[in-house]
Image: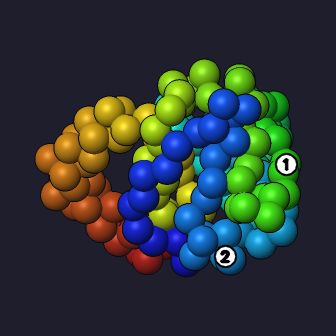
Amino acid sequence: MFLGEYSHNLDEKGRLTLPARMRELLGERVVVTRGLERCLLVFPANDFEKFLQNVNTVGMTAADVRGLSRFFSSKATEDSPDKQGRINLPQTLRDHANLNGEVTVIGAFDHVELWNPAQYLQADADLVKNVPDMSERVNEAMQRIREK
């Protein structure tokens, strides 16, 4: 699983060196796509397919499912880290996450997230403030699932 928080820099060609431990877990092929919170998501290529299958579990007849599938797949890019562990981040993806220069790289269990450092600090502060309420809502949802 992907854990931790790191600070890395984009080079002049838009490449990012991934932390060594994450490179090992990501493997030879990665998929980079847009995240919902103006960050980028990095998946091992095989896991990205599973991620999209989970999005599509409701069925492609639901407009929201089609929209989410399009959101995650239309700007996604597949890449292989080079010998230095760098991946290319196309300009459209860098623009989505407001990445230029320093990048905060975080492990998020089954994937990696790439953040603009200032935006990540704000998102993390909001998360810390809201996590008790979030935990309660998740517990309630899990209870409803168990009851079914």
In the rendered structure, the answer to whether residue 31 lies left or right of residue 20 reads right
**Total of numbered circles in the picture?**
2
Residue at image coords 25%, 62%: 135
User: Which label is found at residue 58?
Assistant: none
User: Which label is found at residue 25?
Assistant: 2
- For label 1, the residue is 78
Which is more toward the observer, 11 or 114?
11
Q: Where is residue 109 in the image (x, y as percent from the top left)?
A: 51, 70
Which is more toward the observer, 12 or 61?
12
Amino acid marked by disc 2? Leu
Is the Cβ of the residue at disc 2 closer than 8 Å to that at disc 1?
A: no
Which secondary structure, mark 2?
A: helix
In the rendered structure, the answer to whether residue 92 lies left or right of residue 35 reads right
Q: Where is residue 86 in the image (x, y as percent from the top left)?
A: 71, 53
Amino acid marked by disc 1? Glu
Which is more toward the observer, 104 or 35?
104
Which is more toward the observer, 73 or 1?
1
Q: Neighbour class for label 2 at 10 Å: few (<14), some, many (≥20)?
A: some
**Dot 2 or dot 1, earlier in sequence:** 2
Which secondary structure, mark 1?
A: strand
Whether residue 70 is visible: no
- Against 31, is 3 above or below? below
Residue at image coords 82%, 41%: 77
Q: Position of residue 120 (x, y in %)?
A: 35, 41
User: How far apart are the two marked residues, 2 and 1, measured between alpha carbons?
Assistant: 16 Å
Residue at image coords 45%, 71%: 3
